[in-house]
Amino acid sequence: MDTCAKIIGLISQFPPTALMGVFDEDNAGPPPKFSQLESWLAHPRRVAGMRPVEDANHLVCAGSELPLVEHRACDCFFLVDSCFGTAGASAFRGHKVIGQWNLPLDAEGLAEQQLSAKVVEQMELRVAAGASCFNRTCRIYAPKYRQIHIGFSDHLRALAKLTADPEASSGPMKPDEIRQALDLAYNDVRRAFLHFVNDPETAGRPFILAGHSQGVMHLVRLIQEEVENHPERCERFVHAYLTGYSVPLDLFSRSLRRVRPSSSASDVCSVSSWRTAAVGHLSQKILKLAAFYAGEGWRLTEDSEMLTNNPITWSRGPEDYASDPAAFCGALWPLPVNLDDPRAEEGGMIPSLNGLRFGHRWMKSRETLGAEVPALVEVDCGSVTARVDSENVLRVPHVPKGSLFSVTERDLLLYHDIDLALFHNNLQKNVALRVQSWQTNRKPTTSVNSPSRSISSKMVVAGA
């Protein structure tokens, strides 16, 4: 990709700050009602075949089978990454919806409803790619939330600087607006988690947290505020897989004491994290920009040391050697059966920078893609090894040119979208190991539901 094309792509992906309007909570529509099944992108009560993009609880390669939902020993609360941004909203140019801070869910107005439908479909696809990595051991719960616009990064830097120095000038940036927008998105997440963790259907059961990118921004805050200081939840908490965004190591000396950084494949009440790049890719500092600290607020972390784990060896921190190729277990992806292969769709001179998300097609229309995903497909990634380098970036070989994942070489954030899916089968093995470790080490007096407990057809309001 030449420099000119990349600049065009950059401009199309991130809006000038002037395009972001004044924050107004009403523009985001009413909050999701987590007592209702439709407020969940994935939920174990949803039976297979109910949606064009299959629920992550049921996604598996054609010809393979998953354990019955009611027989899975653990629960997974999964938070999807950024799907709301200028690329998807470009078809709405001239309408105020393009400059909104938060995704409008169930908002009035045709444009808002169309945009919401487009973004929710992308959320379903991203949950299919990420949350399905845990569905052999876990029942998957993935909430919708009124996520913040992907153009938040410049404003987040201003917010973090203002946190450090209340007298600092923010210039044209809008720290007050982004603080409110972040809080709105987080409060949706928090309410969904409380519904999940307090629901009689999950009471006493072990759980994991998992997410990607913007989802990690909110989960880092959630762990500090809703897990760390709740002993009963800490006892049930198995692990958090936080990929694609910053998890500063100093969190574990400032606001996290019970929850620890992971150092092995089987430790529990712990966190692992990584950001994937090929050997030779530039390190993406935007993915380490800022983090939330309980009692302090948002702080810049782009120059901080990050927690980084290798999802093949499960070691922590820089490694001298890459993993054994034989230890890589395979990658899977939710490829729509009714759309042209993205290798063809994204093969033009100017990339969309959202290759696996069908970026060119997505930007052209106010309608959804209409994607149909009944199953996962195996992805040929060649001989895959992984090593955490001295910059705390997870380095892997470049995927082969003919691979489905090769389209990410033309994405703005390169291998960002495959942080989880590239290691799908390794994650399936690891979550099973950690749950087994949790079961072995838990106190005999702890009351835990049987893994065979059925999923009720009735959802109970708890924390909604």
Image: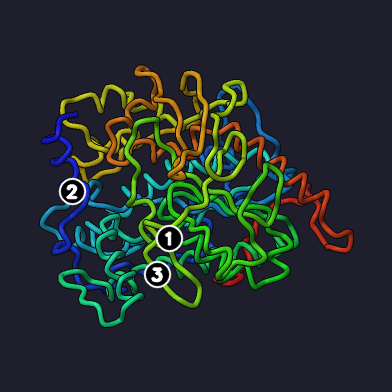
Secondary structure state at the residue bearing disc 3 = strand
Three-letter code, disc 1: Tyr
Q: In this rendering, does residue 414 appear at all?
A: yes
Q: Which residue is mark 1?
A: 145
Between the C-alphas of marks 3 and 1, the distance is 20 Å
Q: Of residues 464 and 232, which is closer to you in this image?
A: 232
Label 1: few (<14), some or many (≥20) within 10 Å? Answer: many
Q: In this rendering, does residue 52 appear at all?
A: no
Q: Of residues 380 and 315, which is closer to you in this image?
A: 315
Three-letter code, disc 2: Ser
Pointer 3 or 1: first along the chain: 1
Image quarter of residue 346: top left
Image quarter of the N terminus: top left
Is 312 placed left or right of 414 in the picture?
right
Q: Which residue is mark 2?
A: 90
Image quarter of the C terminus: bottom right
Three-letter code, disc 3: Trp
Secondary structure state at the residue bearing disc 1 = loop
Image quarter of residue 170: bottom left
Q: Which residue is mark 3?
A: 298
Between the C-alphas of marks 2 and 3, the distance is 29 Å
Q: Of residues 257 and 206, which is closer to you in this image?
A: 257
Q: Does the residue at mark 2 contact the one at mark 1 (Cβ under 8 Å)?
A: no
Residue 359 bears which disc, if any? none
Farthest residue in the right direction? 444
Q: From the viewer's perspective, is residue 157 above or below residue 4?
A: below
Pointer 2 or 3: first along the chain: 2
Q: From the viewer's perspective, is residue 279 above or below residue 87?
A: above
Q: Position of residue 76 (x, y in %)?
A: 61, 51
> Residue at the spot x=33%, y=68% of the render?
29
